[in-house]
Image (cartoon, coloured by chain):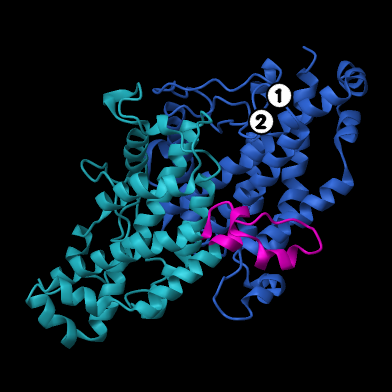
Chain colours: A blue, B cyan
Amino acid sequence: MDAAGGEQLSLAAVRDALVRLEDSVVFALIERARHPRNAAAYAPGGGGAGGRSLVEFFVREAEALNAKAGHYQKPEDVPFFPQGLPLPLFPTKSPPKVLHPLASLVTVNDAIWKMYFDELLPLFTVDGDDGSYAETVALDFACLQVLSRRIHIGKYVAEVKFQDAPQDYSPLIQAKDSNSLMDLLTFKAVEEKVKKRVEKKARTFGQDVTLEVNAGKQQVTASDSECKVDPTVLSKLYDQWVMPLTKDVEVEYLLRRLD
Amino acid sequence: MDAAGGEQLSLAAVRDALVRLEDSVVFALIERARHPRNAAAYAPGGGGAGGRSLVEFFVREAEALNAKAGHYQKPEDVPFFPQGLPLPLFPTKSPPKVLHPLASLVTVNDAIWKMYFDELLPLFTVDGDDGSYAETVALDFACLQVLSRRIHIGKYVAEVKFQDAPQDYSPLIQAKDSNSLMDLLTFKAVEEKVKKRVEKKARTFGQDVTLEVNAGKQQVTASDSECKVDPTVLSKLYDQWVMPLTKDVEVEYLLRRLD
């Protein structure tokens, strides 16, 4: 994780990384929302190689390129198509080993993929086709990548929480009691705050910034319909998918923590 | 151009596209600024294939992938390494033909590349090395691509201006009088407004959004040092490079306009 200094893992550093990634998630969605749905980019076959949709072709190839450049070395960077990824062609720095070695096995990318295309995309893009399929799938890849990174930082959240109270977690891990682990990882008040904050970020970053005199005031009062992505979509994204999937990652990580 | 509807080209549509791309430029720079300089990503050789730097390797390969997906069909989407780009593997929609056919020849990407790495990057990234080279060059590619698109929309600006006053432009084009064309294309008051607006966008989009009560006020008064990218860097970027290079594109386009 970028924010984690050396081998030392602190809750503050993990939280900072999560908060910073909220901005990245909002930026990525705002950029994708420049284009309409562009359903042709998701149609199987699409005229392309191997009968794959354009988006699947693009994400597979982009991940191969990123792997050659040295990506996917950190436990929070998880490819959507891990099979047969090429090795790095350039020297990489090994990330500090702060997690359990089995951390790299934990992935919820299949759920993220399904959520993104089936649920999220229709919520923040308008119906239509502007023909910009290549741009569209590149922007989808950016959204998928940042959502996946954000959610898989749950591995660090789990490690910090475990180190903080091994006596609470160890019996539940040994009993493979996923439900009680989930309860122990859930803080409703914190989740409500996160939802409010991402909504505010969407309102701030998705506004039309102008030089008009009242623009300062307008920043706070701009109606949601004027925003490039509806702020309540961000709140829903975090409530229904990002935070639950993060906790799935945390539970999956903890279940392996004593192996 | 996304904002141009059909074959009809209006100054309003071109302006909207330029204003919207300011947001994209600011987002891209804020994202790159998450990482320090990471000079190793730019060292020739870098251990990689063909003695190229990691960033050159990445941009070449990313452009090849984007070309396969159908990118670079529009006159404002200009690759940095156009030699030997693969053909699209998926069906593409032809963009409406609103520009002179020679528009696709106009490129200032060499100047953009040099400006980005030699001048801009040291202004908005901190010294240092966090080892995240693959992420870094992917974010550089995003910055380069959005700057290039922004600047090459100058082709549409030039076409709109020409259509609006062919009697002013034609004699200068016939005389190949670049200097007078440049004067005719320069509107100091508009440029000052653009500089102020991008600075304000950097201040708005680069702030730390929190849920504190005074956060609304803080949005307007946050000091520049708290922003993720120094807002004056955006103003300088537009003043010294984006707007001059856009006008270079406009002049180059106009010089071919009567061929």
Residue A122, located in which quarter of the rendered image?
bottom right
* Residue count near mark 1 (Cα–Cα under 10 Å), binned few <14, some 14–19, many ≥20: few
**Residue B92 in picture, x, y percent from top left:** 34, 55
Residue type marked 2: Ala
Residue under label 1, please give it.
A8
Q: Which residue is mark 2?
A: A4
* Residue A183 screen position, x and y as percent: 90, 35
Q: Vertical placement of A166 versus A197: above or below?
A: above
Q: Secondary structure at mark 2?
A: loop
Left or right: residue B30 compared with residue B170 = right
Which residue is located at x 12 percent, y 76 percent? B173
Circles 1 and 2: CB atoms closer than 8 Å: yes
On screen, residue B85 versus residue A118, left or right, reads left
Parent chain of label 2 = A
A171 versus B253 height, above or below = above
Q: Is residue B212 magenta?
A: yes
Picture quarter containing residue B204? bottom right
Quadrant (top left/top right/bottom left/bottom right) for the N terminus of chain B? bottom left
| The C terminus of chain B lies in quadrant | bottom left
